[in-house]
Image (cartoon, rainbow, N blue to C red):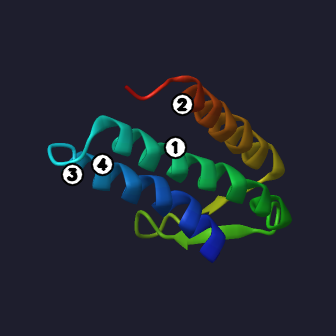
Amino acid sequence: MSPLATIIIALPLLASALVAMASRYIHRSTAHRVTLAAIGLTALLVPGLLLHSGGGSSVTIEWLPGSGPMGLTAGASSVYAMLVTTWAGFLALLGTASR
């Protein structure tokens, strides 16, 4: 898997784990800012995947013995869907004010 795809997957997961673990100790506005920063950075990195779209399998594994290799690919349509979804989430979170 390309390092960019790894960052795009890992960044929101790590930020959400950080907010979930520290939710008792941090203020709600801090949790909102961390979440907004993670989604914003992810939304800015997703267009970089368009350079890698259609380049074959990113990850190839053999799930069941004898079934042959299976892989995940990043086609242009899936990257566009990810781009729209990420930006919609970012704008929705930006529209909600932290209290």
Q: Position of residue 93 (x, y in %)?
A: 54, 30
Residue topped by disc 1:
36
SS for dot 1: helix
Q: Quadrant of residue 7?
A: bottom right
Residues under numbered marks 4 and 3 in contact, where contact means CB atoms less than 8 Å apart: yes
Residue 95: mark? none
Give me the C-alpha separation between circle 3 and circle 2.
20 Å
Give the side of residue 18 with respect to residue 39, left or right. left
Q: What amino acid is labelled 4 in the image?
A: Val
Give me the C-alpha separation between circle 2 and circle 4.
15 Å
Q: Earlier in the sequence, mark 1 or mark 3?
A: 3
Asked if residue 69 can be seen in this view, the reply is: no
Q: What amino acid is labelled 2 in the image?
A: Leu
Residue topped by disc 2:
93
Crowd rating for badge 2 (residues with CA inside 10 Å; few <14, some 14–19, many 20+): some
Q: Earlier in the sequence, mark 3 or mark 2?
A: 3
Give me the C-alpha separation between circle 4 and circle 3.
5 Å
SS for dot 2: helix
Q: Position of residue 56 (x, y in %)?
A: 76, 68
Residue topped by disc 3:
22
Crowd rating for badge 3 (residues with CA inside 10 Å; few <14, some 14–19, many 20+): few
Q: What amino acid is labelled 1 in the image?
A: Leu
Q: Earlier in the sequence, mark 1 or mark 2?
A: 1
Q: Position of residue 44 (x, y in %)?
A: 71, 54
Residue topped by disc 4:
19
Give me the C-alpha separation between circle 1 and circle 3.
16 Å
Q: What amino acid is labelled 3 in the image?
A: Ala
Q: In this rendered view, identify the residue nearer to me: 36 or 9.
A: 36
